[in-house]
Amino acid sequence: MPKRRLPPLNSIRAFEATARHYSFSKASQELNVTPGAVSQQVKVLEDYLNIKLFKRKNRMILLTDEAQICLPLLSEGLDKLSKGIDLIREHSND
């Protein structure tokens, strides 16, 4: 099996939440961290990928084309991780 080359999971979570909400502030509330921490994690992912994921305009953020392409797959992946964790919890309570 080939080795997975992935950025830190927190950076993916921060990007995905920010992209869904179009807001660092709302993402920070969901993730229970500061907006600055979310922004920093998104920057980690942008640096890892060497691309910008958001266009920042005044007080708005927009998704770049690259972000729009990858968001559905990343959201699906996080949903699957969550379901996997739920299955582990269900079976550990038996």
Image: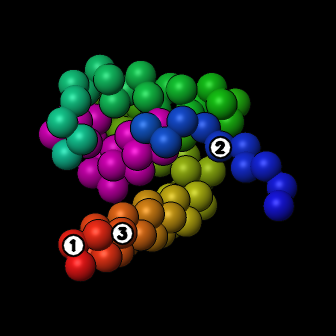
* Quarter of the rendering containing residue 80: bottom left
- 32 sits left or right of 39 in the view: left
| Label 2 SS | loop
Residue of label 3: 88
Per the rendered image, the range of residues in magenta is 11-29
Badge 2 amino acid: Leu
Report the residue marked by disc 1: 93
State the image coordinates of residue 16 (x, y, percent, origin top left): 41, 50
Q: Relative to 91, is 81 above or below?
A: above
Per the image, is 72 magenta? no
Question: Residue 44: image x %, image y %?
Answer: 54, 26
Q: Quadrant of the C terminus?
A: bottom left
Marks 2 and 3, Cα distance to the nearest angstrom? 23 Å
Q: Is mark 2 in CB contact (under 8 Å) with mark 3?
A: no
Front of the two marks 3 and 1: 1
Horizontal side of 62 relative to 45 (left or right) equals left
| Residue found at x 38% / y 40% | 14
Q: Nearer the viewer, residue 11 or 91?
A: 91
Q: Which mark is residue 6?
A: 2
Q: CA distance from mark 3 to mark 1?
A: 9 Å
Mark 3 / mark 1, whichever is N-terminal: 3
Provide residue 12's location: percent of width, then percent of height: 48, 44
Element type where label 3 sits in the image: helix
